[in-house]
């Protein structure tokens, strides 16, 4: 029997979580964001991205698409200025 244990990269749009994720989700404080891109680099779902807006520091700040977020917290762990907070999700 043949079992496939890996998936094609870049298929996140096929695995929308909807209301499912770990019980925490990331909130980005746009004012503190320095636009370093580390969250985008580490996010396993590839859902952190730069916006076209700047904060009061003149930095382009980042956002994430929570429809595809798994709540893994990697973005919050790596953020050098700790501007990502994991909030508990109540359903
Ligand atoms: S919690 Fe995980 S999946 Fe969600 S945006 Fe952060 S790194 Fe990506
Ligand atoms: S890791 Fe933090 S500071 Fe860097 S782009 Fe992401 S949210 Fe902004």
Image: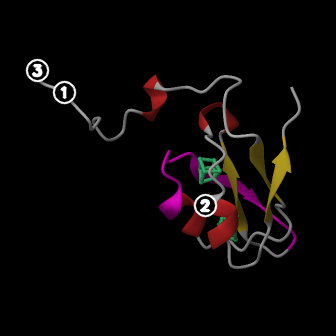
Instruction: Work out whether residue 72 can be spotted.
Output: yes
Q: Secondary structure at mark 1?
A: loop
From the image, tell me which residue sits under label 3: 1
| Residue at image location 19% in from the left, 27% down from the top | 3
User: For disc 2, does the CB lie below 8 Å from ligand 1?
Assistant: yes
- Residue 24: x, y in percent? 77, 45
Q: Quadrant of residue 74?
A: bottom right
Q: Which numbered tag is attached to residue 74?
A: 2
Q: Are marks 3 and 2 in contact (CB under 8 Å)?
A: no
Q: Quadrant of the N terminus?
A: top left
Which residue corresponds to mark 1?
A: 3
Mark 2, other Cα within 10 Å: few <14 / some 14–19 / many ≥20: some
- Do the residues bearing badges 1 and 3 touch, measured as CB atoms within 8 Å? yes
Residue interval drawn in magenta:
41-56
- The image position of residue 4, as x and y in percent, is 21, 30
- Name the outermost residue toward the left: 1
């Amino acid at each position: 029997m043949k079992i496939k244990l890996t998936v094609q990269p870049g298929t996140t749009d096929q695995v929308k979580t909807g209301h499912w994720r770990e019980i925490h989700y990331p909130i980005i404080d746009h004012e503190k964001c320095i636009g370093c891109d580390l969250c985008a680099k580490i996010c396993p779902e590839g859902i952190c991205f730069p916006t076209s807006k700047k904060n009061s520091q003149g930095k382009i700040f980042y956002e994430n698409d929570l429809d595809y977020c798994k709540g893994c917290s990697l973005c919050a762990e790596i953020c050098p200025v700790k501007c990502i907070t994991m909030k508990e999700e109540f359903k």
